[in-house]
Image (tube, helix red, strand yellow):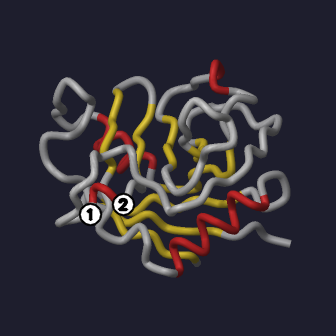
Amino acid sequence: MARPQAVIKTQFGDITVELFDDIAPRHVKNFLDLAKAGFYNGTTFHRVIPGFMIQGGCPNTKPGATGTPGTGGPGYNIDAEFNDTEHRRGVLSAARAADPNSAGCQFYVVVSDSLFLDKQYTAFGNVLSGMEAADQIVNQPRDARDMPNERVEMTVEAL
């Protein structure tokens, strides 16, 4: 049976991901539920670090939001689902705070192998196509907090 997929649409192109519902079912369900509800629409990739990853999905990045970008969530947390997936280029993983069980809505796409993240962050998908868009996003001019100088908005659609 095929794994579920989603597409992250940006001005740099689409990033299509397959989701690991077999090894991270709660994270996949959460991501798909948020996508179907339009939660991600208008959020940005608010943290870009060349040679590492692009992070997005914070509601505080939506137009008119007043919270600090990178600190927002959906109002609940998802317990970690650490697995054997290596954080290699193209892996989709759940961002979190210091508490391993603090993931909510934010996610990142690894643009360079980052094996130091293995079994510390929940990998829940992999890019099928569109890494060239992620590469463009990660190389956008950014400020001292790694936030792109210009908004890189997204919409996320479950396929």
Task: Reply above or below: 134 against 44.
Answer: above
Question: How far apart are labels 1 and 2 at the CA level?
Answer: 6 Å
The answer to whether 60 appears left or right of 21 in the picture is: left
Q: Is residue 75 above or below residue 113?
A: below
Taking the image as shown, residue 63 lies to the left or right of residue 101, namely left
Residue farthest toward the top in the current orientation of the protein = 116
Residue in view at x 73 percent, y 49 percent: 79
Q: Position of residue 35 (x, y in %)?
A: 51, 73
Neighbour class for label 1 at 10 Å: few (<14), some, many (≥20)?
many
Q: Quadrant of residue 114?
A: top right
Count of number-bearing discs: 2
Task: Please provide percent x and percent y for residue 22.
Answer: 85, 58
Where is mark 2, residue-wise?
59
Relative to 64, 124 lies left or right:
right
The amino acid pointed to by label 1 is Lys
Amino acid type, callout 2: Pro
Q: Quadrant of the N terminus?
A: bottom right
Instruction: Using the image, determine if residue 39 lies above or below residue 66.
Output: below
Instruction: State the residue position of label 1.
Output: 62
Q: Are marks 1 and 2 in contact (CB under 8 Å)?
A: yes
Kindly state the secondary structure of the residue where label 2 is placed.
helix
Label 1 residue SS:
loop
Residue drawn at the location 60% of the way across and 75% of the way down: 33
From what the image shows, is residue 149 above or below residue 153? Answer: above
Q: Nearer the viewer, residue 157 or 40?
A: 40
Residue 50, by quadrant, is: top left
Q: Quadrant of the C terminus?
A: bottom right
Find residue 11 and report its horizontal and vertical position in percent. 24, 61
Percent x, y of residue 60: 31, 56
**Residue at the spot 54% in from the left edge and 42% down from the top edge:** 95
Residue occupying image coordinates x 78% and y 39%: 82
